[in-house]
Image (cartoon, helix red, strand yellow):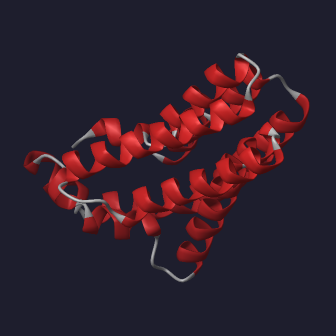
């Protein structure tokens, strides 16, 4: 599997924070948009096409970068991970409620990207039950992370916000996995 695709949202945030550190919000959002475009190209190269998830991330970057650019205010861009996290959390919870967990749907859709020796293990009913539980817990975890990111955007430095919104998401996912996986 192309694990670097998990960093899809990380690079534009890093570019934004670095350029915003120099004091020009407009350059920062332009840099983030360019980084997102490069990531779309990479996604196309790695997957042989651009999937809905990549397009959605890019659309959110364009929307929130556009607002930050128009109003010359980095706060709009800082709320992009909040919106994505909240919507993702809701999607995980809703799909769990209707017994069609998003993680299982994604696994079934992208199974060909996973090494063949792992595919059989991931299709085992016990593993699918764990992934269904993980889907539910991720819903709550993403909502909590979105709240923490919103707080960080309003009360912390740009680097503090970056730590919470970027690497903090991976920490939340890891902690949730440790909670769910036996």
Residue at x 39% of width, y 66% of height: 52
The image shows residue 143 at horizontal and vertical percentages of 71, 55
Residue 175, can we see it?
no
The answer to which image quadrant residue 96 occupies is bottom right
- Total marks shown come to 0
Residue found at the far bottom of this picture: 98
Residue found at the far top of this picture: 22
Q: Is residue 22 above or below residue 58?
A: above
Residue at x 23% of width, y 62% of height: 124
Residue at x 41% of width, y 56% of height: 54
The answer to which image quadrant residue 169 occupies is top right
The image shows residue 28 at horizontal and vertical percentages of 64, 31
The image shows residue 117 at horizontal and vertical percentages of 9, 46
For the residue pair 157 and 70, the one nearer the viewer reads as 70
Asked if residue 116 lies left or right of residue 46, the reply is: left
Screen quadrant of the N terminus: top left
Screen quadrant of the C terminus: top left
Q: Is residue 25 above or below residue 68?
A: above
Residue found at the far left of this picture: 116
Residue at x 53% of width, y 75% of height: 95
For the residue pair 101 and 87, the one nearer the viewer reads as 87
Residue 40, can we see it?
yes
Q: Is residue 148 above or below residue 80?
A: above
The image shows residue 127 at horizontal and vertical percentages of 32, 57
């Amino acid at each position: 599997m192309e694990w670097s695709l998990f960093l899809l949202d990380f690079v534009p945030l890093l570019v934004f924070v670095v350029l915003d550190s120099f004091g020009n919000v407009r350059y920062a959002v332009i840099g983030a948009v360019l980084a997102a475009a490069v990531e779309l190209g990479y996604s196309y190269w790695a997957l042989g096409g651009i999937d809905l998830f990549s397009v959605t991330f890019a659309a959110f970057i364009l929307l929130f970068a556009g607002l930050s650019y128009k109003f010359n205010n980095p706060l709009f861009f800082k709320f992009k991970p909040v919106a994505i996290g909240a919507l993702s959390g809701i999607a995980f919870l809703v799909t769990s409620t209707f017994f069609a967990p998003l993680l299982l749907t994604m696994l079934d859709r992208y199974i060909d990207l996973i090494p063949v020796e792992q595919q059989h293990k991931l299709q085992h009913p016990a593993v699918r039950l764990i992934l269904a539980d993980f889907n539910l817990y991720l819903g709550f975890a993403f909502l909590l992370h979105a709240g923490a990111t919103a707080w960080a955007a309003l009360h912390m430095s740009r680097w503090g916000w970056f730590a919470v919104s970027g690497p903090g998401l991976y920490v939340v996912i890891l902690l949730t996995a440790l909670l769910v996986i036996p």
